[in-house]
Image: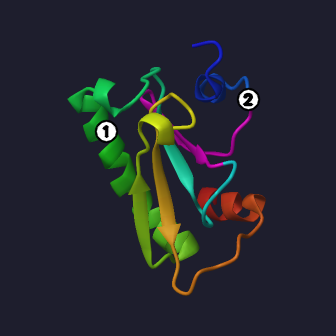
Amino acid sequence: MNDCVFCKIINNTIPSKTIYEDDCVKVFMDANPDTNGHVLIVPKRHIVDFTELDDETVKHINKIVKDLKPRFDEALHPDGYRLVNNYGCYQLVKHYHLHMIPCYEPKQGLIDSDVIFAKLTK
C-alpha cells in the first residue's frame, strides 16, 4: 500500500531503527515508545489486521518474539514484557503489528532511543 507508513518503513522509504529483519518481518523501534526498548514486529506483506494473518506468519512472529527476548534481557534487563495487538479503533496504523514492550519495576523514565538502539544492536 503506497500510503501505509509501515510499508514505507519496510521498503526503506522512511528510515527506522531496525533491530531485526528477515524475509517475513521487520522489527523496529517504536517512534513513540511506552517504555525503553518498545519495538514493533511487522510482517513485510501488507496485512491490515490479525484476522488476515495466516498460521505460518503467526508462528513466525511468535518465534521472533522468543528469539529476541534473550537479547532484550541481556541488553535492557526488563522485569517482564507486554505483547500488544490493537484492532479496529485502537489500531492507529492499519498494517498488522505486534508491540513488544519491555516492562520495568520500578518504572523507568525514557532514555534516548539512540542509546537503546545501540544496546540492542551491539
Which amino acid does the dot numbered 1 rest on? His
What residue is shown with label 2?
14
N-terminal-most mark, 2 or 1:
2
The one nearer the camera, 63 or 96, is 96
Tell me residue 29's x, y (percent): 62, 50
Of labels 2 and 1, the one closer to you: 2
Local secondary structure at mark 2: loop
Which label number is shown at residue 60? Answer: 1
Residue placed at 66% from the left, 23% from the top? 8
The one nearer the camera, 94 or 75, is 94
Residue placed at 43% from the left, 34% from the top? 88
Tell me residue 62's x, y (percent): 31, 47
Local secondary structure at mark 1: helix
Give, as a single range, the part of the protein colored magenta. 15-30
Tell me residue 75's x, y (percent): 56, 70
Residue placed at 48% from the left, 37% from the top? 89
Neighbor class of circle 2 (other Cα within 10 Å; few <14, some 14-19, many 20+) is: few
Furthest toward the left, the residue is 55
